[in-house]
Image (cartoon, helix red, strand yellow):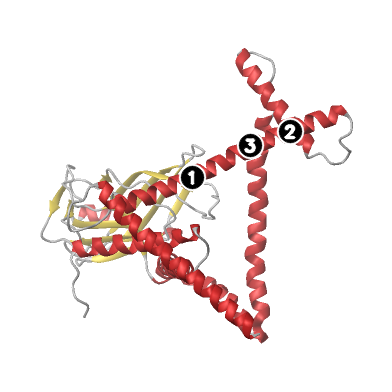
Amino acid sequence: MLPAVSETTQKYLIYWLGAICTLAIYTILYRENRLYRLFEHFYIGLAVGFGLYINFKEVIYDVWWKAMMTESSGSIFAFDTPPHLPGIVLERDDKKEGKGCWKWDVGQAAEIRLREIVKEWGTPNYLKLWAKADRPVSGGRLTLIGTVAVPENGQRGTFSISFPMETDRWRLIRLELRAFDIRGSPFRPFEKIGKRNQLGEVTDLRLRANEALVQADATIFLDDLNHNIGYRWWWVFSGLFGLMFYTLFIPRLAWMSRLAMAIPLGLGSGYTFKAFVLELGPQIDASLKPLYGDIPLLRIVNNAIFLIVLLSVMTYFFFSIEHRHSAIRSPAQFGRWMLMVTFGIVFGNTVMGRFSLFISRADFLIREMQVPWDLPEWSRLLIVGHLLAAFLVLAYLSVLYERRKATVGGTEA
């Protein structure tokens, strides 16, 4: 087993490894050398390994494998708090999940309403409810009734389902969504992510006992109502589709890899075209700024400047006719100058970004230095400066070695 490492030692290791890597990368300021290439490959390998780990954990395992092999569940109502309803008490001893369950005397209240339920259920395949009666009741049934509102279109709907309640033992009741009696329009419209039959906001949820339970004066125990998405076994086909990419290494089956590449490329092209239209369309519309009307004078002047610059830049890129006439040449030259100003601003912003990165690294090297004793900043700066000088010497020696090796090789040739 590896020895335990204290938190202080971990801080020292993290800082000094980071400092060494940073200073080794900065030797590129002298020229390309073996020390720089060594740490460059180290960074690339680390990034590839980290990318593979993230891809496996967050995509292959969490998104694909868990969705295919496990059940996704969300709580609707836990029955863990006192109900404050007639005929119902909180039972803490005879429970199935959580801190307690509800003990419902249907003789006092044939229907109960669940308050403060979770409204957003997403796209459940089925519901699950723990329930039992105090004694077997022939013909006893419960009905679950819900009211749903769709905020997007203002429509409302209801869903209900009846299920038997004839057992005196805890039973996990599974209520398939397709078995519900659905009235109205409780579902949200089709979404971009491709989900159909997504429920709207569930605003009301009730449980109703039938006449057989009421006449028998039965007592019902309820615990943990959840909405669930079951095992999506069909996702195995997406895994098989992904494996088709690797047939590139098998000459006889290489055509499968082309098929696997063509489908995402086609989908990506269509999505890119749609994004192009949706993004550039509003930009073109916003470029046609008004020059008159009930708007302030300063805004009119600003819009005029904007349109002049826009049309001048477009004229510069208009190559269908030669820029000989002053009516074309002058706006084109003005547009060129505006482009140069814009490129200068972009370049200045890039330089500022690079300086921000450098300042961040310098702050890490000097102010966050991890040493066993307290040092003033000038002492830390000296330590970093000496380390950088040592790395530059190593870079110089590596370049000198490569030059001598190249000279010797050329002489032998």
Q: Is residue 229 above or below residue 155?
A: below
Left or right: residue 109 versus residue 355 is left
The image position of residue 344, as x and y in percent, is: 61, 38
Q: What is the spatial separation of the Cα atoms under label 1 and label 2, in whole angstroms?
A: 27 Å
User: What kind of residue is marked 3?
Assistant: Thr
Residue situated in front as seen by the camera: 181 or 29: 29
- Residue at which label 1 appears: 353
Q: Is residue 384 above or below residue 409?
A: above
Q: What is the spatial separation of the Cα atoms under label 2 and label 3, in whole angstroms?
A: 10 Å
For disc 3, the neighbor class at 10 Å (few under 14, some 14 to 19, many from 20) is few
Looking at the image, which residue is at 58% across and 41% down? 346
Give me the disc on residue 342.
3
The image position of residue 279, as x and y in percent, is: 63, 42
Quadrant containing the C terminus in the rendered view: bottom right
> Hey, which residue is sitting farthest left in the picture?
93
- Residue at which label 2 appears: 335
Q: Secondary structure at mark 3?
A: helix
